[in-house]
Image: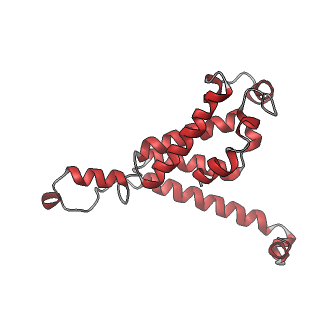
Amino acid sequence: IVLHTAVVQLCPDFLLYYGNNAAININAFIANDWKSDPQFDLFLLLPDDHSKYILLVLLIVASVTLTIGLFSRASSLCIFLIILSMQRHCPINLNSGDHMVRLASLFLTCSAPGAALSVDSLIKNFRRDWRKEGTLPDAVSPWGQRMLQLQVSIAYWQTFFGKLGGDDWVNGSAVYIV
């Protein structure tokens, strides 16, 4: 999802939202939304438009490496920090799905994303003697996975009750209209 968002949705109009001459000036966001509270925004550290593409390229690389399971924890942390910066820099460009991806990447960072079925796991297994230790992955704490499951459950629960109040969903015409 992150790779699709970065390549298909962000690449064509990246500078329109995150450039120095963006559609909505960052100073307007700082004055209206940030007030006097400090916010995390990596885009403010980069001086020109060309250097801001570094964050987009880093987001694409991190999403590819997270997908294949290479440097999984660092990749998920990188994705979290860049999406957090994107949310703080231009909140009108992101939707609730992007916020869900940001939370999921935080939970992945706090868990063991490369413990099994990943390149990280393959590298770890090549370094140890499988005849002595076996080929099963090491047992890890399930709290990161449980938090991610809980977050998805809450999102579906909230969506269900949000749609339950609308007449179009109850009588079945909402899907027909789409």
Image position, residue 123 (x, y; %): 29, 51
The residue under the point 23% across, 53% down is 126
Image position, residue 32 (x, y; %): 81, 28
* Occupied quadrant, residue 55: top right
Q: Is residue 113 left or right of residue 39?
A: left
Using the image as rendered, state which of residue 136 and residue 44 is in the foreground.
44
- Residue 144 drawn above or below residue 31: below
What sort of colour scheme is used for the picture?
Answer: secondary structure
Image position, residue 148 (x, y; %): 52, 55
Looking at the image, which residue sits at the far left?
132
Q: Is residue 144 left or right of residue 166?
A: left
- Residue 86 drawn above or below residue 44: below
Q: Image quadrant for the C terminus?
A: bottom right
Using the image as rendered, state which of residue 61 and residue 94 is in the foreground.
61
Image position, residue 177 (x, y; %): 86, 73
The residue under the point 38% across, 56% down is 118
* Occupied quadrant, residue 116: bottom left
Query: Does residue 80 appear in this view?
Result: no
Using the image as rendered, state which of residue 23 and residue 138 is in the foreground.
23
The residue under the point 29% across, 58% down is 137
Q: Is residue 110 left or right of residue 174?
A: left
The residue under the point 58% across, 47% down is 103
- Residue 151 drawn above or below residue 91: below
Q: How many marks on residues?
A: 0
Query: Does residue 134 appear in this view?
Result: yes
Q: Is residue 86 left or right of residue 104?
A: right
Q: Image quadrant for the N terminus?
A: bottom right
